[in-house]
Image: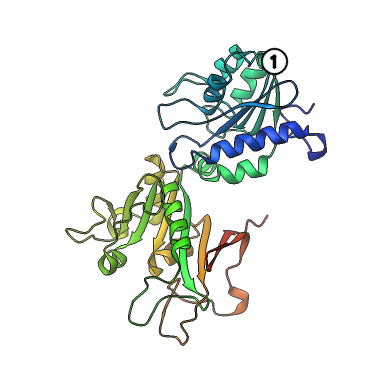
Amino acid sequence: MPSSTTPPTPTAIDPALVAGMGAAIEAAATVRRWTSPNPWVGAALLDAAGTVIATGATEPPGGRHAEIVAFDAAGDMTEGATLCTTLEPCCHHGRTPPCTDRIIAAGVSTVVIGVLDPDPLVAGAGVAALEAAGIEVIVGVEAEAVDQQLAPYLHHRRTGRPWVVAKLASTLDGATAAADGTSQWITGPEARADGHRIRAESDAICVGAGTVRADDPSLTVRHTDGRDPRRVVLGAVPAGALVRPCLEWRPERDGTLGDLLEQLGDDGVLQLMVEGGAATLAAFHDADLVDEYVVYLAPALLGGAGGTPSLAGTPAASIDDLWRGRLGSVDRLGDDVRVVVHPRKDP
């Protein structure tokens, strides 16, 4: 079987291991909104026939990690089993003991890992501990899917900054508000609920002071289950605004948006959602700080040039100057369409 230093090729992977990792990915998805600043990890235990006998997912901070949840569910069926886990198991004492100790004690024969953990406290040491105990380790099964699922965590550990999601909602001709400033509601209830899902998955949410003055938003999670994100406002916040308590970030006093991301990253923010308005979105976009654009398009046309565009700032001078991203996904939500785009990563 492939070693831990060389991810297996698709043709070399046992289909049972792919299915097991799929079960682990599904388990991780159920806790996405609750585990941060810990990663939302999933695990699955397979018996000798490749049948899933137990799954687990990381609990909220201070709780059990995914592997331990799976072991507790499996009881005495762990001897000789195969463990599939989306992220390299930890090997250090944090809020909980090292997962590698429990894995070794459980008597599993093989550990299958989606991606290695870039956290300096792990970073291959988890694999080394397992291999030193005589456990076979396979790395890279369903790595692309796990990379996507854990993108904010992996990005934070590699850069020290949160993953930045820019959320936009507009008509087909790019307007986010009418000439009189009205903007509720361009999109339908399904798209709005999905926007609140992103809020619930984010550790912090950022808007501009102009949006606070115009709309007095609370920026809390509604229409879905999840925790309210920390609230960040670029500029001064009026007394009594619903967004309080919040972090008021004034660039002229506090530093650049990059400095803001550094501070939020130091505070354990893995994902920052930037929700508006057009000038704030443009500031993050122009500074090349956005990792993911989520655009909700309504089947509507404002017409003319009197509306507010999704992004403020100076338009591209020519077609050659267009910002072009990489399409992630396109999904229908009720009568609207959600388009996810990532910046191009040119070699």
- In this view, the residue in front, 339 or 305, is 339
Query: In the rendered view, would you say 211 is above or below 100?
Result: below
Residue 168 in the image, given as x and y percentages of width and height: 46, 65
Res. 265 in view: yes
Residue 212 in the image, given as x and y percentages of width and height: 28, 64
Q: Amino acid at mark 1?
A: Gly
Element at badge 1? loop
Q: Taking 106 as reference, is 253 left or right?
A: left
Where does label 1 land, which residue?
A: 80
Task: Classify 10 Å Cα crowding around label 1: few (below 14), some (14-19), many (20 and above).
Answer: some
Query: In the rendered view, would you say 266 is above or below 205?
Result: above
Q: Quadrant of residue 218?
A: bottom left
Residue 146 in the image, given as x and y percentages of width and height: 62, 41
Q: Residue at point 45% right, 68% down?
A: 187
Q: Quadrant of residue 346?
A: bottom right
Residue sticking out furthest to the left = 239
